[in-house]
Image: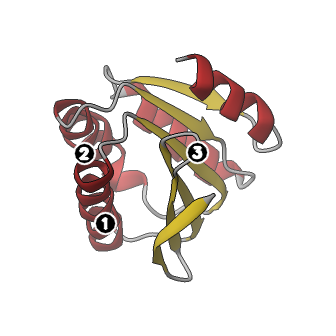
């Protein structure tokens, strides 16, 4: 069962209580301000749920946030690690420029363990999270 923690047209965050991870859904174009706002919400949710794993569904994410990729990898992901996150399963965007942004973000990410899955590999991403 998933408990919805936040829902907007661009971002939905749920706590999958059965599996013990946060499930994010990102949609559309995101500005730096919006990215940072959603990241603050994610950190608060990690703290309140004590989750160690995140499933990030970026299949409907569009281009427009390339300027935040280094900040995400070098600043935000280390904050997640400090809060105890050990694994992130990331479903790739269908939008080609959005895919390039995700790949750029991963080049800046050292921790936690992040595994990129194609947009149609939700089951594989969930299985990977269960074993990591």
Q: Is residue 125 above or below residue 67?
A: above
x and y, in percent, of residue 130 in the image: 60, 25
Q: Residue at x 26, y 38 (%)?
A: 80
- The crowding category of the residue bearing disc 2, from other C-alpha atoms within 10 Å (few below 14, some 14 to 19, many at least 20), is some
Q: Is residue 3 above or below residue 18?
A: below
x and y, in percent, of residue 15 in the image: 48, 56
Locate residue 72 relative to residue 117 in the image: left or right: left
Q: Nearer the viewer, residue 83 or 70?
A: 83
Q: Which residue is mark 2?
A: 71
Classify the position of the N terminus by image quarter: bottom right
Q: Earlier in the sequence, mark 2 or mark 1?
A: 1
* Circles 2 and 1: CB atoms closer than 8 Å: yes
Report, in whole angstroms, how far the alpha carbon at label 2 lies from the one at label 1: 10 Å
Q: Is residue 119 above or below residue 61?
A: above
Q: Residue furthest right?
A: 120
- Mark 2 lies on a secondary structure that is helix
Q: Which residue is mark 1?
A: 32
- Mark 3 lies on a secondary structure that is loop
């Amino acid at each position: 069962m998933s408990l919805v923690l936040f829902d907007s047209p661009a971002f939905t965050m749920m706590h999958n209580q059965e599996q013990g991870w946060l499930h994010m859904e990102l949609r559309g174009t995101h500005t730096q301000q919006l990215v940072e706002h959603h990241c603050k919400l994610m950190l608060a949710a990690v703290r309140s749920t004590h989750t160690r794993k995140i499933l990030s569904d970026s299949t409907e994410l569009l281009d427009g946030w390339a300027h935040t990729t280094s900040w995400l990898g070098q600043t935000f992901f280390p904050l997640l690690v400090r809060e105890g996150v050990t694994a992130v399963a990331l479903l790739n965007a269908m939008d080609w420029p959005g895919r390039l942004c995700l790949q750029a973000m991963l080049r800046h990410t050292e921790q936690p363990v992040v595994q990129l899955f194609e947009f149609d590999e939700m089951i594989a991403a969930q299985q990977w999270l269960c074993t990591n």
